[in-house]
Amino acid sequence: MHRIRGSFAPAVLLLGALAAHSAWAGSARPWLNPKRSPDERAALAVRAMTQREKLRLVFGYFGSVMPGTTYQPPRAVRMGSAGYVPGVPRLGIPPQWESDAGLGVATQRASSDVFRQRTSLPSGLATAASWNPRLAERGGAMIGAEARASGFNVLLGPGADLVREVRGGRDFEYVSEDPLLTGVIAGAEIRGIQSQHVIAVLKHFAMNDQETGRTVYDAQIGRAAARESDLLGFELAIERGHPGALMCAYNRTRGHYNCQNSWLLHHVLDGDWGFRGYVMSDWGAAHSTVRSALAGLDQDSASTVFDHTPYYGPALARAVKDGRVPERVLDEMDLRILRSMFAVGVVDHPIQRKAHINFTADKAVAEADEEQGIVLLKNAGAILPLSSTVHRIAVIGGYADRGVIDGGGSSTVFPVGGSAVRGLGPKNFPGPEVYLPSAPLGAMMGEAPQARFRYASGRNLAHALQVAKWADRVVVFETQWAAESIDVPLHLRRQNRLVAAVARANPHTVVVIESGGPVLMPWLGQVAGVLETWFPGTGGGTSIARVLFGAVDPSGHLPVTFPASVAELAFPHLPGAGLPLGKPFKVDYRRQGAAVGYRWYLLKHLKPLFPFGFGLSYTRFAYQGLQAALRHGRLVVHFTVRNVGHRVGAAVPQVYVAPVKGSVPRRLAGWRKVRLAPGASRTLTVSVDPRLLARYDTQDHRWVRAAGTYQLWLGDSAEHLVQSVRIRLPAWQHSARWPVHYRSAAVPLSAH
Ligand code: BGC
């Protein structure tokens, strides 16, 4: 007898007993009994399915027309969406209606006659910059509810690739450069989405860290380094969020395409992490039938449009028929898909079309997220918050009179009322460049009714300088559009020249940056204030104004290091840039290993422009009393934070850790976000996940923490550390191997 993938073996073996004993035994459809476990229900349903039905659930369609092709989507799709997988009506199994993405309900541009107008969260980096998992969960619940109200039960997000490449065009969809912050925030967003009975799809697994050559590059990385960096982010997100599905990415890792990479899908995801959900391919990321099926690809997405040739469907039917893919492997694909549909509530809570969306309430969720995600980077002479005694305010550039910029590509959310600025960016994918209609200028006027405002677009330099000279204070906006499929330069040349000229004309200048990620600031020494606002999301103009005028204290901290120059990056030359389109190349992450972001700067003794974790406030905090102890085998850290300023504000004390011996750079071990009134203090506790002090042993497949002395630091960034303590810890090891699976016989680990 074949062995099946371990995590589902008990469910299948239970089948005989179940059918006999259940109160639903007489029922024609016992899998619809919500009292049974998702495993039992999935097993019962698969048993009732014909092979045709089994093949149907693993084969996805594109949810839109595709210009330039004759493709006609099935009638039941939600037109203008990412995907659709038919259900099995005979068995009461609904279709899977799939929509992008992690920031809100998107519309595929390929079908231009349909535009859903929905609420957009600020970018993933903004949510991460709040360091507040509760906000991430609320945001997830908001977009999950909008997805459901729009007819979708699968949301293709969040993204959890680490920001290894600060020029990455999709960094705005991701969380951070640190695995712990990424895992905590993505895990919370998943919980929020799935609270609405919508399956969250964690993506893009894995090492999809740049857009240049994303379908052809091969990420070269040691197994231990991967486990301690990018994979750890996914591992923590899965543990905390239990996503129903995971999307394998376009690129290759260690020589093999991710969607047929048995090391990633089979050994790590299933074997070591015991992942119970299903794996779907990114659109066009599948490359084979048998190899993919045996490696752990459960569902081939939009295959008739995006695959070279559809790899599942008839091709998979043939492979099952002639035994190249054992029927039990097909069963397991269906088991996994159905288990998630039952576990998340997709079957028990059918979609009600045309449900009401409360856009005002949803905007408030996005605004709250952005308010805590805005990072105050510079505040010379306490120029911010702008005081009520300021009478003349100049606002320059960035379409600040109309709205705030949003990211491009499949995640583009079209706002209620349409884009505030039309005709920008590419006409086709990944365009257009969308501005959400929340004008910072109008919102600023609302915050300062006593002041006079003048606006200059910045296109006419002389006019901008005239307006700047007239004003008591100048707020100049820089915007950078970033999008899927393209990477972006760090240097905003034309806008940097504008900022420098404006600052020369009036030194009381504050720069507000709306960007997909870090940018260079050659004018930093000339301006008084800087706010990083990311892609600010629906209502973002209001959030910016509230921070500028002090209705909200800035409490965001950077989830990514801001470089001082391109030369200090691990890859000064963007890998693959300049190569002919489609030419395969390698990205050698062995250069960095697990030292991503701030850990690279520490390793190389480099000084960034702004470090990871950095963020100012309008008040000040003092940290003291750092203590570390081992409690029930777990490292626990205590410290006290006091608001020593004169305003209410929120602090983000951070704990970093490293072994005292050796050269392993410190890493984030935990943090707390706490709001304090002036003079108030709180004693806080952080419990440290032992994996953050451990190395991954690839020989024995386990986490190992050596006995020895470890140093802990307390600070408010990866560089600004105010206290440290040492503690001796005993050895610790952890191996979470799930039983050996059917598929490991097909693809031995040594092949990787
Ligand atoms: C993107 C995915 C997205 C899918 C469906 C792909 O191009 O990489 O993130 O979910 O399209 O739109």
Image (tube, rainbow, N blue to C red):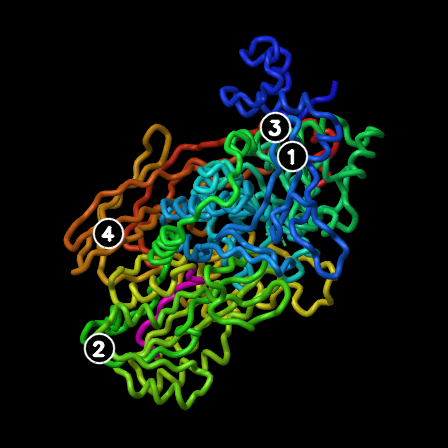
Disc 1 from disc 2: Cα separation: 62 Å
The quarter of the rendered structure image containing the N terminus is top right
Q: Which is more N-terminal, label 4 or label 1?
A: 1
**Residue 507 in view in this figure:** yes
- Could you tell whether 554 is left or right of 225 in the image? left
The nearer-to-camera label among 3 and 2 is 3
Disc 1 from disc 4: Cα separation: 56 Å
Of the residues shown, which amino acid type is indicated by label 4? Tyr
Compare residues 377 and 172 and report the one nearer the observer: 172
Q: Dot 4 surroundings within 10 Å: few (below 14), some, or many (20 or more)?
A: many
- Could you tell whether 489 is left or right of 374 in the image? right
Check disc 3 and report the residue beneath it. 92
Regarding mark 1 in the picture, which secondary structure is present there?
loop
Check disc 4 and report the residue beneath it. 623
Q: Which is more N-terminal, label 2 or label 4?
A: 2
Q: Does residue 533 show up magenta in the picture?
A: yes
Q: Which residue is drawn at 21% across and 51% down?
A: 676
Residue 191 percent location from the top left of the image: 45, 39
